[in-house]
Amino acid sequence: MRSVITGTGIGLASHVVMNEDLARIMDTSDEWIRSRSGIQQRNYAAPGQGSAELGSLAASAAIAKAGLMPTDIDAVIFATMTPDHVLPGNGPLLQAALGLRNIPTFDIRQQCSGFLYGLELADVLVQSGRYPRVLLVGAELHTGFMPWHLGWDTVIGESDREVTEAEKAENTLSRDRTVLFGDGAGAAVIEAREGSAGLLKTLLFTDGTGAGVLTMKGASFKTRPFVTPAQIEAGETIPVMQGKEVFRSAVTLMPQAVRDVCSAAGVAVESLGLVLVHQANLRIIEGVQKALGLPAEKVPHNIERYGNTTAATLPILYHECLEKGLVEPGMLIAFTALGSGMHWGAALYRA
Ligand SMILES: CC(C)(COP(=O)(O)OP(=O)(O)OC[C@H]1O[C@@H](n2cnc3c(N)ncnc32)[C@H](O)[C@@H]1OP(=O)(O)O)[C@@H](O)C(=O)NCCC(=O)NCCS
């Protein structure tokens, strides 16, 4: 008995924002963003939209694709670092929105590795025999981090107002991070099935000594109250990132995790049909591909259209590979991710 992905779906935020749109509200350019990250556009949620809503859209589509009813789901794992509320988590919001039974819903974070960690948990739940049909969702709404009250209306095309020079200068302070991220959701239904297809092996890692490499200082329960006007003023509610350090870790640890998961499962890296890499930066994705010695067509990407959607990149990418007919029955597929924590790892899956 293996854990098989029987349906996938995506939920995209409504506004498509081009690099040029961002260049209207901060000192950046299409050329800089494309050449450093490969990103051309990303989706931003409409005001009032949340990651629970995007996740619910993706989940509905995944349940339908699996040929199931919402009431067939036995457990939910919702991975997000950008939930609608600090409490409760997105799991109960999705349960109510989709009319699921009063089943357990698990809210996890794990940032860019959220979907990968969720796969492992889903496998454990399914293999226990207690939860034969698990819904796994990865959804993020990064726009809440962004200081877009200084030009939000302009960037999503709801106004033609040009930002002031002071607003532009303030938006530029976070440009090294804000241009990289987008909003979105992906979901997968994971079911117990007889046969050779399914999740073969997962390897997950954490190194908390790297916690400060990508973190958010403000909105911390170590301060009273947990968020203060001074923190917002100082930009401490926007994550800080040592970009080059994350880059270095990503291009070494992800290929190593893929090699290790293949070796643990007794399969050669060359026999992989697809390697789905967390979509953070096209140069990272190409670095992983080269480190593994695989041809570019085995390492597909969609970062150019969505930017980094954190827990949502892997399920959106897998869904698009299925839709494009890139996934053949019996094909070996590796999923790999790395993100804030640091958390990283890889999963090996037979389609
Ligand atoms: C963030 C990242 C794209 C930066 O690329 P880089 O090649 O390292 O660029 P640098 O940090 O050296 O910045 C180069 C210059 O561009 C400037 N710059 C930064 N962001 C900019 C932007 N959006 N537009 C224009 N210029 C920008 C910097 O200020 C710097 O200027 P300076 O040389 O005058 O000081 C890259 O390090 C990266 O992708 N890291 C990994 C990030 C990641 O994956 N995060 C998510 C983890 S899951």
Image (cartoon, grey):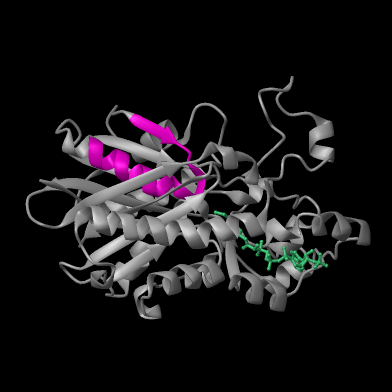
Q: Is residue 328 above or below residue 65?
A: below
Ligand 1, by image quadrant, is: bottom right
Q: Residue at coordinates 78% horizontally, 28% vertically from top-left?
A: 228
Residue 244, percent from left and from top: 65, 59
Instruction: Please indicate whether residue 78 sits to the left or right of residue 14 in the image.
Output: left
In percent of width and height, residue 76 lies at 32, 37
Kindly report the secondary structure that dominates the magenta region of the rendered protein.
helix
The magenta-colored residue range is 105-124
Q: Answer with left or right where residue 136 lies relative to residue 22.
A: left
Q: In the shown orientation, is residue 126 left or right of residue 59?
A: left
Residue 114 within the segment the image draws in magenta = yes
Q: Residue furthest right?
A: 165
Q: Residue at x 80, y 64 (%)?
A: 25
**Extreme top residue here?**
224
Q: Nearer the viewer, residue 210 or 28?
A: 210
The quadrant of the image that shows the C terminus is bottom left
> Is 103 inside the magenta-drawn segment?
no
* Residue at the image point whose x is 32% and y is 75% from the top: 324
The image quadrant that residue 246 belongs to is bottom right
Residue 73 appears anywhere in the view: no
Report whether residue 164 is seen.
yes
